[in-house]
Image (cartoon, rainbow, N blue to C red):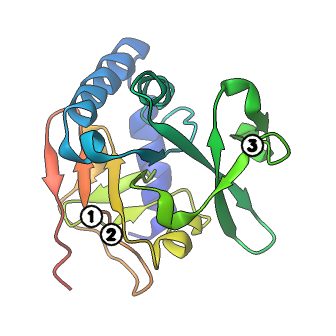
Amino acid sequence: MNKGKQREEMKNTLAGLSKEQYDEKSRQIHQALFSSAEWERARIVGVTVSRMPEVDTIPIIEQAWLEQKLVAVPKCYPRDKSMKFFLLRGFDELETVYFGLKEPDPTRTKPCEKSAIDLILVPGLVFDKRGYRIGFGGGYYDRFLTDYTGKTVSLAFKEQVKDELEHESYDIPVSTIMTDESTYDCIAGE
């Protein structure tokens, strides 16, 4: 099955979650993240501002601030499919861009070097237990992660994790996937 079809299939599956299921599953994933060594060690956390059907990241950003962690949020540049992270101190520093996405306003935030980010929460729609993922189709994270040396974690509902996905040579697996039921230490033995 091609990536486009898998994306659509997963969007339909996630659309079937009730608001109560979505909230409860997100809470369980937050608890798993907040009790993890990756979270504990991270001083700067890279995270997108989620929107349905992704795991809710607003409470993650708020918890990071509460724990005096720095929050770096990505801004995508469609022209060259690149991405840069900016330090976010408040939700009022966000702007709404294409497709209703919330990204940092670069005129109100400071850039954050890739090497300074300890933990990046990598979004996606479909994942496999080896850490490979099907994202939303832009390829931004695969490009960004090519020379990233920090920890990568994806947060997903259990429905989003499959045994194995086909992947391309340029696909970068994440090191850990945390769901509402399990945590997978991913070793993409390739």
Q: How many marks?
A: 3
Q: Residue flagged by tag 2: what amino acid is it?
A: Pro
What residue sits right under mark 3 in the picture?
A: 109
> Callout 3 environment at 10 Å: few (<14), some (14 to 19), or many (20+)?
some
Where disc 1 sits, the SS reads loop
Name the residue rendered at 43%, 49% in the picture: 9
**Above or below 104: residue 5:** below
In percent of width and height, residue 98 lies at: 79, 46
Sequence-wise, the earlier of marks 2 and 1 is: 1
Q: For residue 173, which numbered disc appears in the image?
A: 2
> Callout 2 environment at 10 Å: few (<14), some (14 to 19), or many (20+)?
many
Is the C terminus in the top left, top right, bottom left or bottom right quadrant?
bottom left
For the residues bearing labels 3 and 2, Cβ distance under 8 angstroms: no
What residue sits right under mark 1 in the picture?
A: 131
Name the residue rendered at 24%, 26% in the picture: 31
Sequence-wise, the earlier of marks 1 and 3 is: 3
Q: Mark 3 and mark 2: span between their CA atoms? A: 29 Å
